[in-house]
Image: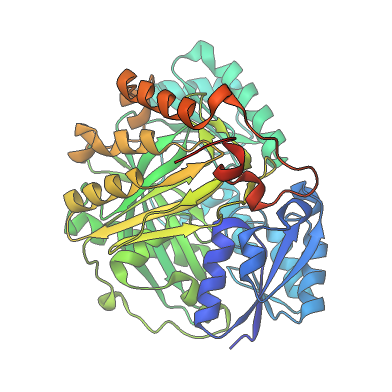
Amino acid sequence: MFKKILIANRGEIAVRIIQTCRDMGIQTTAVYSDVDTAALHRLEADEAVCIGGSDPSDSYLNMDRIIEAALETGAQAIHPGYGFLSENPGFAEKCTRAGIVFIGPSAQVIREMGDKLTARQIMMAAGVPVVPGLAGNEYTLHDMIKKAGETGYPVMIKASSGGGGKGIRIVNAPDEMKDALDAASREAVNAFGDGRVYLEKFFTRARHIEFQILADHQGNTIHLLERECSIQRRHQKIIEETPSLALSPELRARMGKTACDAAKAAGYANAGTVEFLLDDQGRYYFLEMNTRLQVEHPVTEWVTGLDLVRHQILIARGYPLSLSQEDISGQGHAIECRVYAEDPENGFLPSPGSITWYEAPSGPGIRNDSGVYTGAVVPMEYDPILSKLIVHAETRDQAIAKMIKALSRYVVTGVRIPVDFLMDVLDCDSFRKGEVFTNFIDVHFSDWRPLRNDGDLACLAFIVDDLCPGSVVSAPRSGEAHALDHSPFRTLGPWKL
């Protein structure tokens, strides 16, 4: 087994990987940027190496410096987490050349599955159903308009190297096609350095269903059931759950087999996710394959009882799968909510800053994968995710109730978080009935605003006025920020009990 693993990431996913390594008796090396000097993942690891400045290109995307850190500390393997370099085939190749094991699939698989056009072609050749459309940059504007007319509007223009909702435009009529193509291509160049786009049919009532797969280097491939990921904002998932109410046992078995067939067609080894679009007629189509650990992997861990990071490490070390498909079954229902530092009343813009108080819910059936603490700083340079809150219960109704209660006890001050929004989504009649589609937020919450109770606001104003006579607020000390500098006992000004 590996003696030491370097985690080439930050935040909650780095902390998550460190926890499994600790359970397995594996030492960990964290890497961090200048702005992450006091980040939780740096504090949790056995050792840590500063790899550069706050800009991602100077640190978490600096392949050579990360590999140098691994060699300097004697790490035998690198776990990339998700985001940053996790789906960069060049990084996987550099690891291999340096004699370091990359915990993930091969560089070739990452390259082929990361290119949506190549992935579609591989899946079509293997008989895996794909979304109707045109896949190839050799098509002209006229070809796009013609194909859109055949498949029927609306259609979606997607970046070939896309992800995270970037490089996507919805087209509802022929006269919108040119502007959508140009805009999607420009955004794709800025985000991925690749302006190629392709066209797919856009389904207004469709679900986003993904299957978690595990595959070893001996040719064994299994799936670990599905995840319902249809609750999305600007094509970015925000709530995930398993199992999906849309899948019968028969449909689940068929889609699971197709997911395994897709992984085999790609030559896949390690943990990965095959994503499908499920239409309202029960037909499903391959969307893409994510060649890494997913943000939403904890819901699968809840219902299967498996540690996916542990299996990633074992597979990377060369061990065959210890499980067969017959060993996999789901127990109960799990839901995950992503908690970001963002302002729901201001277009969900990022809300960086110092966390003056952090208190996460806990209890039976509640899990919080977090990368922050009271006094931690949320930098503006990186994805503003604070944690993933996950609950597990015997039934879906119980899981929803547990999640709403947990969110109501999730306390963060200093930055904004969208817990009120998440609670309203979970409490929506359509969500409770399982009537969730990829346009759910646009249909039900496009003009969402938090409910205000004037009486409660008046009480709060009275309390603040009583605690802070004259609205005097003490200024923080100059110099390096410290958790105590942002304590409510210092920043409230004069107060009394």
User: Could you tell me residue 86's position as x and y percent?
Assistant: 62, 59
Q: Residue furthest top?
A: 175
Residue at position x 48%, y 38% in the image: 417
Q: Is residue 202 above or below residue 410?
A: above
Q: How many marks?
A: 0
- Residue furthest to the front in view is 496
Coordinates of residue 61 in the picture (x, y in percent): 74, 54
x 69%, y 66%: residue:
92
Image quadrant in which the C terminus is located? top left
Q: x%, y% of residue 211?
A: 37, 58
Q: Is residue 383 left or right of residue 263?
A: right
Horizontal placement of 250 versus 23: left or right? left
Instruction: Tell me where residue 206 sits by quadrant.
Output: top left
Residue 36: quadrant of the picture: bottom right
Closer-to-camera residue (167/267):
167
Whether residue 217 is visible here, answered yes or no, is no
Left or right: where does residue 270 sit relative to residue 101?
left
In the image, farthest residue toward the bottom: 1
Q: Nearer the viewer, residue 19 or 74?
A: 19
Using the image as rendered, state which of residue 273 and residue 394 is in the foreground: 394
Q: How is the image coloured?
A: rainbow
Residue 260 is at least partly visible in this image: yes
The N terminus is located in which quarter? bottom right
**Residue 418, x across and y down, in percent:** 44, 36
